[in-house]
Amino acid sequence: MATTIEPEAAEESLKEIKSIVQRLEPVLTRIDSGMRKLETEVAGLKLDMAELKVRISQLPSTIVMIGFVLAVLGAAGFLRYFGPR
């Protein structure tokens, strides 16, 4: 069953919709500019994360650090018994 809309009611609805769209345009513009700023900030964060990954990959592993500590302790023990007195 098709309903018909009175031309006056259709025009009134159309004016109301136009009014709502006009009020939404500045809000959408602000949202768009905010999203553009967010995009640039995220791009900067990606670069920072890449730099951190490079630096972290250059850190010594746990096994290397344990080996270093044991080597220092071994050298200290060796020098204690066989070093100058």
Image (tube, grey):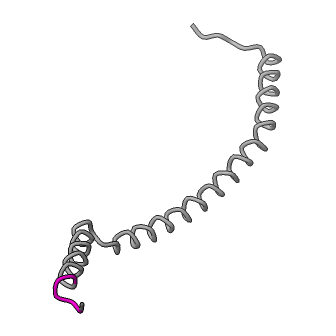
Between 54 and 70, the one nearer to me in the picture: 70
> Residue 4 location, x and y as percent?
69, 12
> Residue 64 location, x and y as percent?
24, 72
- Taking the spot 55% from the left edge, 59% from the top edge, the residue there is 42
How many numbered marks have been drawn onto this rendered protein structure? Answer: 0
Q: Is residue 16 magenta?
A: no
Between 44 and 3, the one nearer to me in the picture: 44
* Residue extent of the magenta highlight: 80-84
- Taking the spot 79% from the left edge, 33% from the top edge, the residue there is 18
Q: Is residue 82 magenta?
A: yes
> Residue 2 location, x and y as percent?
60, 11
- Is residue 75 rendered to the left or right of residue 35? left
Main secondary structure found in the magenta portion: helix
- Taking the spot 82% from the left edge, 21% from the top edge, the residue there is 12
Residue farthest along the bottom direction in this orientation: 84
Between 77 and 53, the one nearer to me in the picture: 77
Q: Quadrant of residue 58?
A: bottom left
> Residue 43 location, x and y as percent?
54, 63
